[in-house]
Image (cartoon, rainbow, N blue to C red):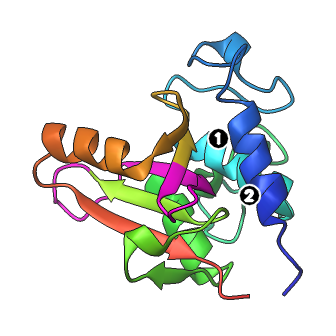
Amino acid sequence: MPSFDHTAFANYGKKWTSSPYDGDKKEDFNSSYPYFKNNCANFVSQMYNKGGWKRTGGVNLRLDGNWDDDLSGPAGPSRTWSQAKELYKYAKNKKGLDPLGNIWNAVPGNTYFMDWDGDNVINHVTAVTARTSRGTPRISQKTANRHNMLLTTWKAKVDGSHPKVKWYGLRRTS
């Protein structure tokens, strides 16, 4: 498996969530990639791409092996690129990411996927972009924009507004 650059992944996430890109408007995103009103998976896919994941191309947006922001033909981005639940399956099944048993052990380059209402359908993804000197993970994401936020703060916010939330962490083992 090719090496993955955790630093490039994290730096990209921090860059595009900080000022002057600290919102969720189109101008707050890298114009080299597509923009969607709901951009969490698209943004984390960009981070994975900057970390070293290569686009796979293809023409069918439904094929689980296609991961690209602009498939050949009229298809546009693959579902594995643009939808959190499909990105989760792609990351596990095609990229070999492993479940993270304890979300507090996450390091830059890891991701958290969330099922907001406990129905076993993943609705959101965020990325770990740093750790504090005491080891607390920090996250960065789009929709809604968050820049290097402490996991303690983000988890309290999520758990408070989504009491049935399920967290799924993924990590690289190599």
Residue type (three-letter) at the residue carrying disc 2: Tyr
Judged from the image, the secondary structure of the residue bearing numbered disc 2 is: helix
Residue 70 numbered mark, or none: none
Query: Magenta stretch?
Result: 116-138
**71 w.r.t. 33: above or below:** below
Badge 1 element:
helix
Question: In the image, is 51 to the left or to the right of 125?
Answer: right
Residue type of the residue flagged with mark 1: Phe
Say if 116 sits above or below 19 in the image: below
Verify CB contact (< 8 Å) between mark 2 and mark 1: no
Q: Position of residue 121 (x, y in %)?
A: 29, 59
Name the quarter where the C terminus is drawn.
bottom right
Please provide percent x and percent y for residue 74. 76, 37
Where residue 94 sits, quadrant-wise, is: bottom right
Q: With respect to residue 147, does 131 lie above or below?
A: below
Q: Is 133 covered by the magenta stretch?
A: yes
**Quadrant assignment for the N terminus:** bottom right
Residue with the most extreme front position: 133
Horizontal side of 157 relative to 110 (left or right) equals left
167 lies left or right of 38: left
Q: Which is more N-terminal, label 1 or label 2? A: 1
Q: Residues within 10 Å of mark 1 (few under 14, many from 20)?
A: many
Task: Identify the residue at horizontal 72%, vertical 64% (top origin).
Answer: 66
Q: Report the disc number at residue 48.
A: 2
61 vs 54, nearest the viewer: 54
Say which residue appears at 16% left-offset and 51% top-offset: 117
- Asked whether 59 or 57 is in front, the reply is 57
Asked whether 132 falls inside the magenta stretch, the response is: yes
Q: Residues within 10 Å of mark 2 (few under 14, many from 20)?
A: many
The location of residue 13, given as percent across then percent down, is: 69, 42
Q: Residue at x 61, y 69 (%)?
A: 64
Residue annotated with mark 1: 43
